[in-house]
Image: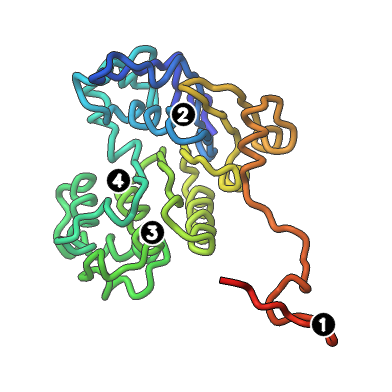
Amino acid sequence: MTDVPLLDVEDLQIELITARGIVRAVDGVSFTVGEGETVTLIGESGSGKSTTAMGVLRLLPEGLAVLSGSVRISGRDVVADPAAARAVRGRTVSLIPQDPMTALSPVHTIGRQLGDALRLRHPRMSRAEIREKGTDLLAQVRIPQPDTRWKAYPHQFSGGMLQRVLIAVALAGEPRLLIADEPTSALDATVQAGVLDLLMELQEQESIGMLMITHDLGVARIVSDRIHVMKEGRFVESGPAHQIVERPTQPYTRDLLAAVPGLGAWDEDALPGTAQPGTAVQEVSR
């Protein structure tokens, strides 16, 4: 791991211009992401975590968002130099967007969309080389029969498969840093676990740094090296993942932990059809 972080955010402030006035959505946050590590921003909806991620990538609407502080991606400050953001997006840093069902064009094949991402990184590649590298990427993210799926449309994939395609699109630029904005929020628990396992495996293989955005502490505790808990645009608690999960110091963090669903005690007598011999089952009135 190099001494210079892949992402170095210092005193980032983001003010949004709205019809009701100026809103400070992000209020002086600082954090770093190093090679091969995962840093997670966690908080409830509206806490500012996704705005932070979009600010880091300079994807907020020009003229409606004012950024200050510094955001250095591989040493280049994208706040001071907006052109630097365009140079690193899709190359040094890639985004895995939030909703796999709407992030891809429904009228173009998966191969067309993944191929376009590959051409941005390798403009001189032939069509055959693009397809070969693209199918290799689909296989890498565990898409079965990638040669056949290359010509398929998004509606022919499940939500979990589409999320894997989005990961492949993000990897097409051969990034050193991934920003994953709620990458599992639209998926059920079983598929969610598979996507998280894939992200951790890819990170271990490629030493990619990852900034994870989530509202789910259950996800954060699995994937994170460090966690920053965000409320109303500020970090209220930061530290190693095990410390935040096992020994939180702030009431807000404890409330987030308490909101994570858990399994209760097993009570087979409470299940329908498990009444003990000699007992009557009362009919539920409607």
- Residue 202 as seen in the image, left or right of residue 274: left
Q: Which numbered marker is on residue 279?
A: 1
Residue that appears at 71% across and 33% down: 243
Q: What amino acid is at disc 2?
A: Ser
275 and 72: which is toward the camera: 275
* SS class, disc 2: loop
Within 10 Å of disc 3 (Cα), the crowding (few <14, some 14-19, many 20+) is: many
Residue that appears at 48% across and 19% down: 29
Q: What amino acid is at disc 4?
A: Gly
Point out the image quarter for the C terminus: bottom right
Nearer the viewer's eye, disc 1 or disc 2? 1
Q: Which residue is mark 3?
A: 164
Q: Is residue 7 above or below residue 80?
A: below
* SS class, disc 4: loop
Earlier sequence position, callout 3 versus callout 2: 2
Earlier sequence position, callout 4 versus callout 3: 3
Circle 4/circle 3 CB separation < 8 Å: no
Distance of mark 4 from mark 1, alpha carbons? 65 Å
* SS class, disc 1: loop
Q: What amino acid is at disc 3?
A: Arg
Image location (x, y in percent) of residue 28: 46, 14
Distance of mark 4 from mark 2, alpha carbons? 30 Å
Image location (x, y in percent) of residue 200: 53, 51
Q: Which numbered marker is on residue 173?
A: 4
Q: Quadrant of residue 85?
A: top left
Q: Which numbered marker is on residue 47?
A: 2
274 and 148: which is toward the camera: 274
